[in-house]
Image (cartoon, grey):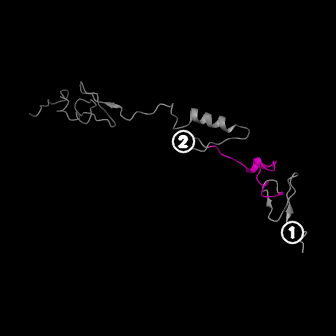
Amino acid sequence: MEFPDLGKHCSEKTCKQLDFLPVKCDACKQDFCKDHFPYAAHKCPFAFQKDVHVPVCPLCNTPIPVKKGQIPDVVVGDHIDRDCDSHPGKKKEKIFTYRCSKEGCKKKEMLQMVCAQCHGNFCIQHRHPLDHSCRHGSRPTIKAG
């Protein structure tokens, strides 16, 4: 017993295979076999409307918008040069920027510790007036013995 109306032939000109489970292309609305249903396999003229790829920056994993006619590699390259937060060539902010004002001390701290009397910036070790020999205040300080 034959079923002449069962299944459809592949719309690819070089194939025309009778397929009982054809796949309809959502862009060009034609029926294709399992081998020709991808856009590239049947050279779909409307693939650009559906097959949209958004490139992702390899350094910061941010999706990069690409306009029609732009080359994705060039757009990602521009992003890396200008906007990328993880660019290795960009100058990173220094974390330890506050250097101790005590003579001979080269320590740097993340937080600014200003002496209330002399207004100097000091590290944790020299933050107290007695530790940095503070003499600029309104009252003289004496080192504890």
Q: Residue 141: horizontal and vertical position, in percent?
A: 14, 31
- Identify the residue under disc 2: 60
Q: Residue 36: horizontal and vertical position, in percent?
A: 80, 54
Image quadrant occupied by the N terminus:
bottom right
- Identify the residue under disc 1: 6
Few, some or many C-alpha atoms within 10 Å of disc 1 (few <14, some 14-19, many ≥20)? few
Few, some or many C-alpha atoms within 10 Å of disc 2 (few <14, some 14-19, many ≥20)? few
Tell me the quarter of the picture where residue 28 sits: bottom right
Q: Which residues are magenta?
A: 30-55
Image quadrant occupied by the C terminus:
top left
Q: Which residue is at 76% across, 53% downward?
A: 38
Please state which of the two labelled residues, at mark 1 or mark 2, is closer to the viewer. Answer: 1
Q: Residue 84: horizontal and vertical position, in percent?
A: 55, 37
Q: Which residue is at 25% across, 36% downward?
A: 124
Q: Image check: 36 left or right of 128?
A: right
User: Quick one: label 1 or label 2, which is nearer the N terminus?
Assistant: 1
Up-down relation of residue 40 to residue 134 (above or below): below
**Amino acid at dot 2:** Cys
Judged from the image, the secondary structure of the residue bearing numbered disc 1 is loop
Q: Residue 134: horizontal and vertical position, in percent?
A: 19, 29
* Main SS, magenta residues: loop
Tell me the quarter of the picture where residue 83 sits: top right
**Amino acid at dot 1:** Leu
Q: Which one is in front, 133 or 124?
A: 124
The circle on residue 23 is: none
